Image (spheres, grey):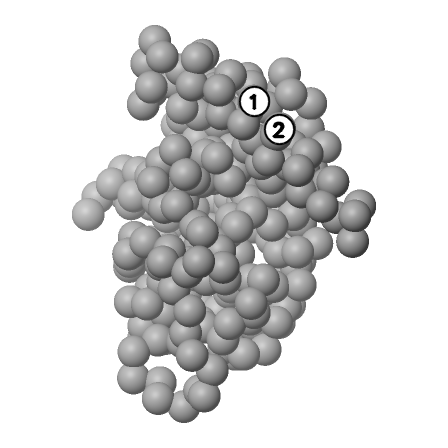
Amino acid sequence: MTAKQHIASMLRWWDHVGVGRADLAVRRSCGAMIWHHDLSLDALPIGWAKAENVRQGDVYIRPARGYPWPLVFLDDLPAPTAIRVADKYDALVVETSKAGGCHLWLACSRVLDEEERYQSQKWLASQIEADPGSVSGEHLGRLAGFKNWKRGGPWVNVLDASLHGRRWCPSLQEPVQHPGDGQSATPVRDPVNSQTTGFDSSESGTEWGWVCGLLEAGFEENRVFEMLVDRAGPRRGRDVNRYARRTIKEAIKHTSGIGRRMEAC
């Protein structure tokens, strides 16, 4: 693939699993960090990032802070390990360099706030021997399709962008398993088919979970509406406003019901 295709592959996978907004950052050779916060994926200043990369700036990305996302991050995995995980789960494997190993973005069966992502990443890193120092919950990863100047300039490439419809289930804290492990007595649960999670991997199902997570996190209804219209517009076309209103209405009922059930406990 070309550099442009690696960028597109990574952003397309993020969008598919439910991450529609990102923070983009460049660390210049002088050490200064230049930020672009909370942008939709199609609004990221890729041309600017390319120009910075040519001048030996390193290009980083993360899901935008302040939102719940169905994604966790692991750093410094050997490529064979990361690819085996991607054979089992919906996961994005980004090779940062031969020496530095891979970043793994692992799709989850539900959205997680920043603290939940931190706890999940900390636990996963201890299970799979990833870098324990890269588990903050808001950690930056490298954007594929750019050169890694920290390592002398090798290209950062997408090695795998799997979409099996099987996601890691953080609420069950299931061990990340991959074909050939044969060493865990804990059965692997399928979040897609599990009656306990009821996860729907379709576009509308992913958006439903995302909207519920935003409402539960305290985002105002009007702001959630704007974000859903922005996210679903290319797919829903002229129907997007009706779709967004109906989705949010049902999500409010759902999240209100959860609140009442929790108060009754």
Q: Is residue 138 above or below residue 37?
A: below
Locate residue 222 relative to residue 8 in the image: left or right: right
Instruction: Give the percent coordinates (x, y) of residue 150.
Output: 49, 58
* Local SS, label 2: helix
Let me know if residue 65 appears in the view: no
User: Which label was assigned to residue 249?
Assistant: 1
Could you say which disc has been placed on residue 26 in the image? none
Amino acid type at mark 1: Lys
Question: Where does the image place residue 8, in percent across and percent down from the top left?
Answer: 30, 38
| Nearer to us in this view, 54 or 171 | 171
Check the image and report above or below for 238 versus 256: above
Which residue is at the far front?
A: 264
C-alpha gap between disc 2 and disc 1:
5 Å
Q: Quadrant of residue 28?
A: top right
Q: Are marks 2 and 1 in contact (CB under 8 Å)?
A: yes
Mark 1 surroundings: few (<14), some (14-19) or many (≥20) residues within 10 A: few
Local secondary structure at mark 1: helix
Q: Position of residue 132 (x, y in %)?
A: 62, 71
Residue 163 in the figure: left or right of residue 31: left
Query: Is residue 248 something that shows in the picture?
Result: yes
Toward the top, the furthest residue is: 238
Q: Which mark is residue 252?
A: 2
Name the one closer to the observer, 98 or 224.
224
Q: Residue at x 29, y 43 (%)?
A: 9
Please provide percent x and percent y for residue 111: 56, 47
200 w.r.t. 236: above or below = below
In percent of the image, x 51 and y 72: which residue is there?
A: 174
Q: Residue at x 29, y 84 (%)?
A: 180
Residue type highlighted by circle 2: Ile
Q: Residue at 49% of width from left, 25% of height from top?
A: 247
